[in-house]
Image: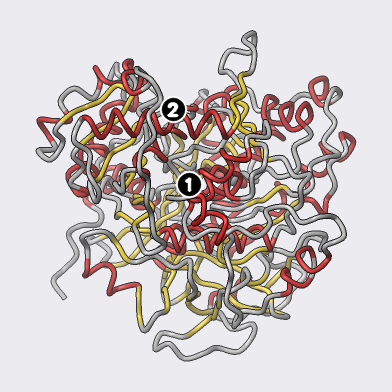
């Protein structure tokens, strides 16, 4: 990669303040317009950011509060990536090879990711086992990913290397598990790095609801198109500063934060997900201390701040710099948004800074974004009409927050079962197309053909348009059909979580088949800290009543479990299919090395199940 190549494709990362064409006209690109990314690959962007060497770079917030922060410039990171690339080349990594990255949030993740790309190899970021009780599950997942990707190398830390020791035995393609500390040894040596837009950028294994995620193959062209479209949608400017606790092995953290900030050469403040989960105030404090302007999180992140940040801690915060708080990766809960604005408005947080967004890994990341500065838009629609596929406004209905319009250069439609375009306010399948859409699932032509049809990506989500804005109503696979009526799992879960004693973001609804009654029934599994039998029974009864009153559905069974029982993806999404599987196996409970089994309290509705029936449900349907 030569300096001439860089200068040919690079025009201006940060135009002068007087250059209104960048800050206005380019934001108005319609869906039929082609994007013109600044760089052909994210590797070009990384090397260019390093050559600027103006002190901009990444600041790492330590997990221990008493330790100092550490900052490395993009120039330092490029030089370290060159050193890592040389060490990997010596170990035999060649163009096209897949390299599994099992690394925590760290400078080493950044440099290893780009070092692999410098060699023309393909990074495969994955979830590092972070907690002892999840080690076995994480290892099973890693073995599946390594085997499916045919990864030849695994780069991890010395600490995790011991834990991953039998990866080579269980995934025959893995030749070596390399401790990242060894890659830092030696002097800097320039690697002849080359990359084209059509080259694979990395393979993103979807979070999935089971232990067998699919690998989304994204090209450099996909990546630069998406981060460029995001920059236009966010009205990027030279004063922006990114702050994030999102995991770097997940698309929202990797593409939406790391690659985005590298591409636009923004200062970035990173912290580990566990740092946020243990002390949410540290995320907000980092925004306050560093003047953060762009910081995303799933809805549960904002909810956790409402629940865990005390009034005394809020008193010392200044969130007035927070220009855009991107809210995505899971359904946006209106109640959570209002509570966050209420609690943190006195700290300088503005309601119009909350930016609901929608996307998925198969389209790199971003699909639709709310326009910055627009007021929060939501509709309250009739539940019964929504179940029939129509979004009719009703004061006593369910609130749905708008996730905005398609990002520049991309198209989004809502269509029927046969692909026919639906009018506004009719619920259908959300499909999209554009330069960000994946090449396909890695080594899975059948799965690719199932979601890619004539250039359109069928997202698996349901929604509708109103006034040109998209509203997402739920996942196709999470639609529960009971006695001919449709119910959205999210709606049932929302009502359950409003009950005092049920943990926010910790309710899962699903349907199961009762062969005795030859009918589908509905189960709600909810986490609670309550331990007294009488209190738990009262909470379960309240859940039944809340869903019945607001949704018109009698839940057949409510199962109350301890905190930590419900499985979630690496990005915090509920795993409904896996929850249902664990429920049927009577295996719901916190994953602890002690093998502790939880007692489950059941509350039965008028057509309830006997507790002993649970293990006979689903999986044994009569032959069709």
The image quadrant of residue 144 is top left
Q: Which mark is residue 298?
A: none
Q: Residue at x 34, y 72 (%)?
A: 451
Q: Is residue 210 above or below residue 283?
A: below
In x, y percent, where is residue 133? Answer: 34, 23
In x, y percent, where is residue 192? Answer: 35, 43
Q: Is residue 525 above or below residue 550?
A: above
Is residue 609 among what the camera can see? no
Tell me the SS state at disc 1. loop
Q: Badge 2 local density, few (<14 within 10 Å), some, or many (20+)?
A: many
Q: Which residue bears the numbered disc 1?
A: 573
The mark tally for this picture is 2
Label located before the other in sequence (1 or 2):
2
Q: Residue at x 17, y 59 (%)?
A: 620
Q: Badge 1 local density, few (<14 within 10 Å), some, or many (20+)?
A: many
Q: Estimate the spatial distance between the alpha carbons at disc 1 and disc 2, rounded to whole Å.
A: 27 Å
In x, y percent, where is residue 571? Answer: 48, 43
Tell me the SS state at disc 2. helix
Q: Which residue bears the numbered disc 2?
A: 108
Is residue 536 among what the camera can see? yes
- Furthest toward the front, the residue is 4
């Amino acid at each position: 990669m030569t300096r001439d190549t860089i200068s040919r494709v690079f025009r201006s990362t940060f135009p002068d303040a007087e250059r209104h064409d960048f800050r206005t006209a380019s934001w108005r690109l319609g869906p039929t317009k082609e994007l013109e990314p600044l760089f052909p690959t994210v590797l070009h962007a990384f090397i260019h950011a390093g050559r600027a060497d103006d002190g901009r770079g990444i600041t790492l917030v330590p997990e221990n509060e008493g330790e100092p922060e550490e900052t490395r410039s993009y120039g330092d990171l490029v030089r370290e990536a060159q050193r890592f690339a040389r060490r990997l080349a010596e170990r035999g990594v060649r163009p096209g090879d897949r390299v599994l990255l099992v690394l925590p949030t760290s400078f080493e993740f950044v440099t290893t990711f780009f070092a692999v790309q410098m060699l023309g190899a393909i990074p495969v970021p994955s979830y590092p086992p972070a907690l002892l009780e999840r080690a076995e599950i994480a290892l099973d997942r890693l073995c599946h990913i390594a085997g499916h990707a045919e990864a030849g190398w695994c780069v991890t830390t010395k600490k995790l290397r011991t834990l991953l020791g039998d990866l080579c035995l269980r995934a025959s393609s893995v030749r070596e598990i390399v401790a990242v500390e060894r890659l830092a040894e030696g002097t800097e040596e320039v690697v002849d790095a080359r990359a084209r837009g059509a080259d694979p950028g990395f393979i993103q294994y979807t979070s999935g609801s089971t232990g067998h995620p699919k690998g989304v193959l994204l090209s450099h062209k996909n990546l630069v198109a998406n981060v460029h479209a995001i920059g236009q949608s966010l009205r990027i400017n030279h004063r922006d500063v990114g702050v994030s606790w999102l995991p770097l092995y997940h698309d929202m953290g990797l593409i939406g934060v790391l690659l985005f900030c590298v591409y636009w050469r923004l200062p970035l403040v990173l912290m580990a997900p566990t740092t946020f989960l243990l002390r949410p105030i540290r995320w907000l404090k980092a925004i306050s201390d560093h003047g953060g302007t762009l910081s995303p999180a799933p809805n549960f992140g904002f909810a956790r701040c409402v629940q865990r940040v005390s009034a005394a801690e809020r008193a010392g915060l200044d969130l007035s710099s927070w220009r855009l708080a991107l809210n995505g990766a899971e359904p946006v809960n209106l109640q959570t948004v209002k509570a966050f604005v209420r609690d943190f408005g006195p700290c300088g947080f503005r309601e119009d800074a909350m930016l609901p967004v929608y996307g998925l890994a198969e389209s790199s990341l971003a699909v639709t974004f709310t326009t910055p500065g627009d007021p929060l838009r939501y509709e309250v629609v009739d539940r019964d009409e929504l179940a029939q596929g129509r979004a009719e406004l009703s004061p006593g209905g369910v609130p749905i927050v708008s996730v905005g319009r398609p990002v520049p250069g991309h198209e989004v439609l809502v269509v029927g079962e046969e692909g026919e375009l639906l009018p506004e306010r009719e619920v259908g399948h959300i499909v999209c197309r554009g330069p960000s859409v994946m090449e396909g699932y890695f080594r899975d032509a059948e799965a690719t053909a199932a979601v890619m049809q004539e250039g359109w990506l069928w997202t698996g989500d349901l929604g509708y348009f109103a006034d040109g804005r998209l509203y997402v109503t739920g996942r196709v696979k999470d639609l529960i059909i009971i006695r001919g009526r449709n119910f959205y799992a999210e709606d049932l879960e929302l009502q359950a979580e409003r009950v005092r004693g049920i943990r926010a973001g910790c309710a899962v609804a699903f349907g199961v088949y009762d062969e005795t009654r030859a009918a589908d029934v509905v189960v709600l599994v909810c986490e609670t800290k309550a331990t007294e039998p009488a209190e738990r029974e009262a909470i379960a009864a309240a859940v039944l009543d809340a869903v019945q009153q607001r949704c018109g559905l009698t839940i057949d069974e409510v199962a109350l479990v301890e905190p930590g029982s419900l499985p979630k993806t690496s990005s915090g999404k509920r795993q409904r299919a896996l929850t249902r599987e664990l429920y049927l196996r009577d295996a719901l409970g916190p994953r602890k090395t002690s093998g502790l089994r939880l007692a489950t309290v059941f509350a039965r509705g008028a057509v309830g199940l006997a507790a002993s029936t649970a293990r006979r449900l689903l999986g044994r349907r009569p032959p069709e």
